[in-house]
Amino acid sequence: MAQKNFYSSETYAVGKSVAALMKQGVQAFHRTVDEKVADLGLTSLQWGPLVLLANGKASTAAQLSRCHNVDTSTMTRMLDRLENKKLITRQRNASDRRVVDIELTEEGHRLAQKIPHIITESLNQHLRGFSREEFDLFQTLLRRFAEGERKGD
């Protein structure tokens, strides 16, 4: 059976698409995390780089920019703030002077260790009331939606 399109330009309503709903969900989640990380002196945009650095998922501004899907200048300003808070240090790479390596300070490590608890607490808050089956289905459907760009027609 052929897939029927769910949307058309004639019936599309701004703010009611699944993409808009997902964006609203992510924004609500980030507001929740923001409230919780405020006690640590961080914003939702600042905790992400700390977690990535702590877990070895990134070590340069370019890598962090790709992970967060922001341009390098935006990430550089974020890193300036984190450096001013003494949570990171930046140093030119010895083998490639064009690259600036980023490392967490001791205080940066201390804060980064607290963030996973805040994230999981916030996720669980937003998932409250979901059954295990609903949660599993939700994850499956989100994965399928995310893979849609790779599958194409």
Image (cartoon, rainbow, N blue to C red):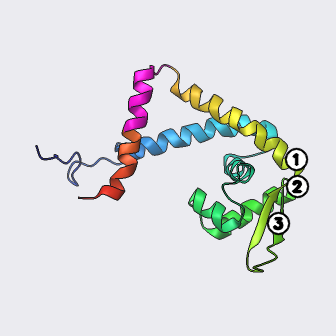
| 134 inside magenta stretch | yes
Q: Quadrant of residue 16?
A: top left
| Residue highlighted by disc 3 | 90
Cα distance between the residues tagged 1 and 2: 7 Å
Tell me which amino acid carries mark 2. Lys
The kind of secondary structure element at disc 1 is helix
Instruction: Judge left or right: residue 90 versus residue 47.
Output: right
Image position, residue 121 (x, y; %): 65, 28
Mark 3 or mark 2, whichever is nearer to me: 3
Q: Quadrant of residue 63?
A: bottom right
| 17 inside magenta stretch | no
Tag 3–tag 2 contact (CB < 8 Å): no
| Residue highlighted by disc 1 | 107
Instruction: Judge left or right: residue 44 versus residue 139.
Output: right
Q: Which residues are magenta?
A: 129-140
Tag 1–tag 2 contact (CB < 8 Å): yes
| Residue highlighted by disc 2 | 86
Cα distance between the residues tagged 3 and 2: 11 Å
Cα distance between the residues tagged 1 and 3: 15 Å
Q: Residue at x 78, y 80 (%)?
A: 97
